[in-house]
Image (cartoon, helix red, strand yellow):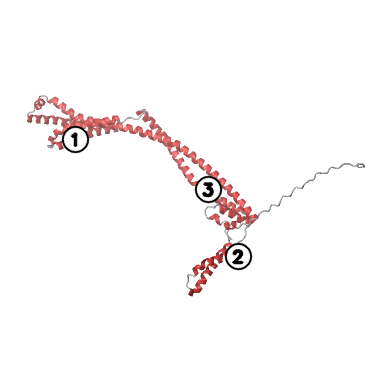
Amino acid sequence: MNTPNRNLHQGKLKPRQLEALAFYLGAHDVDPVPVQNEIEAKFVQETSEQRQEPLRALHALEAKLQQARKERPEAEAIWIRIRKELGDTPPPYFQAVLMACCAFFALMLDTLFLAPTMDILNIANPVVQFVAAAGFAALCTALFELTGLLYIGAKDSWPKRLVAIALGTAGVLSLAAWGLLRGYELRFAAGLAGNPLGQFLAEHPGLASIFYIFITLATPIIGATALLLGWQEVSRARTWRRVRERFEQLRTAEIQLDRDIQTEQEHLDQFDKRKLAECLEWRAIFAQFYERGKRNGAVRETRLSVIGKSLLAGLGVTPLALLIPFAWFPAQLGLPLSAILATYIYFNHRRHHPSHERYLDRENTQFAVIPDAPQPRELHKPQQRLLSKGDQ
């Protein structure tokens, strides 16, 4: 016979298995309390395992909410400071684009000015002169921009500021010398060509020197300043948008996570209520089928039924036996007999050791006989009797 708690250790207990187990226990008058306790312990274990996933989701949401609440004050303080510095509206990119255009035109103008003077460096090809002049202009612009960035980034560090000032001074002196050299070179070239410009520059050397120094210094300085201002505008605009986006994300995430936690908590509460109702339902099913098993019991399958199934299996195998040559008559006879014997052993074992579900299917159903209702007695009306003379 099957052990009562065999199905309890085969994974999740199904309602049909619970009904069969309860019926089996009731039919054999087994104390149901230990099995009920084991079923409830199994149910509690399954419920605890099923609660792990929503609990992990709830803990993850709570951790995210805690992190958002931790980061929000700092993000809010930074956002307030940026609003005070840059205003309530996002800085536009138009000024940065305008500064970039000014820097580009300054570089082009410096390239046009420097290209003819590349003869000093023994560069005679006009195309190569233009390329070399463009590189020289970009190099001078980068020098002054680097000086500006170093000076701005130094803040309260005087050694860094002194380095920036020294670098800028060296650049100014170098370009001033380059401007003087350009003026002398142009006057020399004009004199060789018999150009009146050479006579004019010879008559006004001081004015010519100031002019060439100015255009040599002005274009890279203006280009570097325009690029620096444009980059600062881009940086301010990006900072304003990034800080605002971060603050809005944290604020929105805090609200949304709070709602998600409430929803997940309600889901867990409903899960516990649903599992409690399911446990009560299982208790009721167990009690009902235990009482049915105790009251009705089950009918054992008859030996005649087992024999009939065995013979039926033998008849089903007989056509296969006819395929064997007649010379092997023992094999022809042995095949049906083997099928009959195997079927008999299987069904006879199941007859003596039925499963809980099969035991429930063999319930000894008793039909209730309702007695006929008694017929109502017919009452006769009393006859009217007249008193005669002499009656009292």
Q: Residue at x 33, y 32 (%)?
A: 237
Q: Is residue 148 left or right of residue 321?
A: left
Label ID, residue 311: none
Q: CA distance from mark 3 to mark 1?
A: 77 Å
Residue 238 in sight in this render: yes
- Judging depth in this view, the residue of 205 and 132 nearest the camera is 132
Q: First in sequence, mark 2 or 3: give its number.
A: 3
Q: First in sequence, mark 1 or 2: give its number.
A: 1
Q: Is residue 196 left or right of residue 279?
A: left
Q: Residue at x 31, y 33 (%)?
A: 235
In the rendered image, residue 150, in percent from the top left (x then y), is placed at 27, 33
Q: CA distance from mark 1 to mark 2?
A: 112 Å
Residue type highlighted by circle 2: Leu
Q: Which mark is nearer the camera, 1 or 2? A: 2
Label ID, residue 304: 2
Residue type highlighted by circle 1: Ala
Q: Is residue 352 left or right of residue 253?
A: right
